[in-house]
Image (spheres, rainbow, N blue to C red):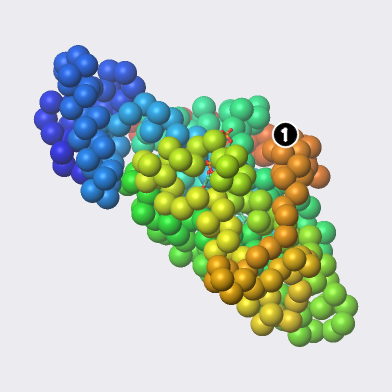
Amino acid sequence: MTSVTSPPRGGTAGAEAHGGPGAAEPGGPEAEGALQEAFDAAVAADERIEPRDWMPDAYRSTLIRQIAQHAHSEIIGMQPEANWITRAPSLRRKAILMAKVQDEAGHGLYLYGAAETLGASREELLDKLHDGRQKYSSIFNYPTLTWADVGAIGWLVDGAAITNQVPLCRCSYGPYARAMVRICKEESFHQRQGYELLLALARGTEAQCAMAQDAVDRWWWPSLMMFGPPDDESAHSAQSMAWKIKRHSNDELRQRFVDICVPQAEALGLTLPDPDLRWNEERGHWDFGAIDWEEFRQVLKGNGPCNEQRLRRRRTAHENGAWVREAAAAHAAKHAARSAS
Ligand code: FAQ
């Protein structure tokens, strides 16, 4: 975006350029008004907002909230599947699963990096995750009870993530949009490996097929909840869509996901656990049954089956990694001192 980075306010790196109340300098309310106009025009023209551009404080804090929640989801999301790495049924499956779990860590890093461009420090974001001030996706508070859950997560959870994230590649904030391009490519591989795993089970013995069906039964409804509350209860959607952070509403994306999954389930020979699923000729979409929003609210409140375990494990991993962070900081300081002298 060029118009908002013009000389009066652009060009400086660091805290001032990262905005907050001082970012509109020089000038008073008039300059601020001009900056707001340039920002609005850039968003309307589908231009990208970049880290050193002026942006409204609320735009910045909304992005930090969403990107941080997304980053936290990626790293907490490593836990349910990591649970099966040591018990993968073959070397091939183990190698695939290890690569996938590592990818999720990488996604967390891109996303924390994107949040840092907005002036949020990684330490601060992790502190907020660890003490419960920031959320992570509800889906990762469910247990992985059998090997088939690895397939169901790939097919449904990564599938829902892609449906939600492909439009985010066109998000108005440049660093987030660019991170999403790479993440979506990797998620696409994740989704396919899950589908292929479930297909192998569905075509296997009776017991394997039953295990696949049971996993789909347990992961279907929580996957639909990943898209967030219904539109009329979504606190942030209207503003986020006006800013072109979100391009579609929660319900639109949820419907898109259901429409994609129904024929895929049929191809797998598995049943989606919803007696109300019906093709609606008039709407050109699949109708589906009522989601248990009380369950969603309870999981968000910390009362899901695994909330406590997930956060406890995350905090322990962070504490155990303290020496690595200290060593890295000491190493960097030593090199900085050497090059200064
Ligand atoms: N879980 O007003 P809205 C993945 C919160 S990555 C928990 O509709 P918004 C990859 C929401 O934060 C999965 N909280 O909010 C993977 C807000 O609370 P707040 C994560 C939720 O932001 C696969 C309140 O409810 N993906 O799976 C959830 O406009 C396999 C009101 O909601 C992303 O984060 C939820 N499901 O829309 C990794 C994508 N839904 O903040 C490992 C980016 C809503 O005011 C293994 N995020 N809330 O306290 C988004 O697109 C949006 O943030 C939504 C929510 C759509 C999630």
Residue 258 vertical placement versus 105 (above, below) = below
* Callout 1 amino acid: Lys
| On-image quarter of the N terminus | top left
Identify the residue under disc 1.
301
The residue sitting at 54% across, 64% down in the picture is 256
| On-image quarter of the C terminus | top left
Residue 300 vertical placement versus 176 (above, below) = above
- Using the rendered view, name the quadrant where residue 182 is placed: bottom left
Tell me the element at label 1.
helix
- Using the rendered view, name the quadrant where residue 272 is placed: bottom right
The residue sitting at 82% across, 78% down in the picture is 209
Relative to 146, is 251 on the left or the right? left
The residue sitting at 30% across, 37% down in the picture is 51
> 104 and 2: which one is in front?
2
Q: Position of residue 83 (x, y in %)?
A: 75, 56
Residue 54 shows in this picture:
yes
User: Does mark 1 have its CB less than 8 Å from ligand 1?
Assistant: no
Q: Position of residue 169 (x, y in %)?
A: 39, 55
Relative to 6, is 44 on the left or the right? right
Residue 9 vertical placement versus 289 (above, below) = above
Relative to 137, is 172 on the left or the right? left
The residue sitting at 82% across, 59% down in the picture is 145
